[in-house]
Amino acid sequence: ELPILIKLIDAEDNLSVQVHPNDEMAKKLENQNGKTEMWYVVEAKDDAKIIFGVKEDITKEELKNAISANTVENILNSVSSKKGDVFFVEAGTVHAIGKGNLIVEIQQNSNTTYRVYDYDRRGADGKPRDLHIEKAIAVSNLFPAPELKKAEDSTLASCKYFTVKKIDCYNEAKIQLDKDCFRSLVILSGNGEITLNNEKMTFTKGESIFIPAQDGELSLNGSFEAVLSYV
């Protein structure tokens, strides 16, 4: 299986507050991979928010009490989001994407998600959707997430699970390929043409391009923004 998943998330409503376990806890609880991820904000409305960790250090008992009392929002760190922001969501970080955000998400290939809070939304049966309280409390990092840092050079995020870079092309760009790993592109804006092994293909905003592992160099022409991902 591919080691990462790449998604475009268009949040028309607040998504549920979640937390993902690290590899050790995911193996113990679910016999699956953990889930560290990163977000690049492609577009954001003026009032768009991101929940990123907790405001201050809390205990597991305090988190449990907040969930029981339906006061979780009071302990969460809610920050404004804008185009170009980068959020590195390490496993164990309580988080949520707020309405009005369009985000590219790069994550470990894992579906292990524990729902902490869901704004009292109801399922098709009219009952509140399930929360995963005990597991969420067990895997959560109950201290503030690190301050957001502006990306240096073109690198948006780099960890043992993935590397993500931003490409801003105004005429021509080159990408060095690698026989040990694929390259994945998501086109954020503009359009252009890709040339590989003497074959050409056009692309435009919103499209995704997967380049299998191989030696060589990828040529890109046009005026566009893109996110490049690999491991």
Image: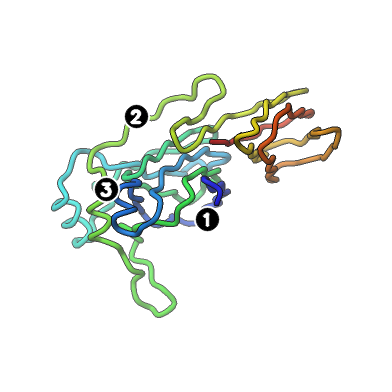
Element assignment for label 2: loop
Report if the CB atoms under discs 3 and 1 are less than 8 Å apart: no
Residue occupying image coordinates x 44% and y 32%: 159
User: Would you identify the image quadrant in which residue 91 lies?
Assistant: top left
Q: Secondary structure at mark 1?
A: loop
Q: Position of residue 2 (x, y in %)?
A: 56, 48
Residue 126 horizontal/vertical position (percent): 38, 78
Query: In the shown orientation, is residue 183 left or right of residue 36?
Result: right
Mark nearer the N terminus (2 vs 3): 3
Pinpoint residue 29: horizontal percent, then vertical percent: 30, 58
Task: Give the image location of residue 165, x and y in percent.
Answer: 57, 29
Residue at image mark 1 = 12
| Other residues around mark 2 within 10 Å, as few (<14) / some (14–19) / many (≥20) | few
Query: Callout 3: helix, strand or loop?
Result: loop
Inter-mark Cα distance, 2 to 3: 18 Å
Viewer-proximal residue among 225 and 71: 225
Q: Which residue is mark 3?
A: 140
Please identify, in this view, whether the residue under mark 3 or under mark 1 is nearer the observer. 3
Amino acid type of the residue tagged 3 in the rendering: Ser
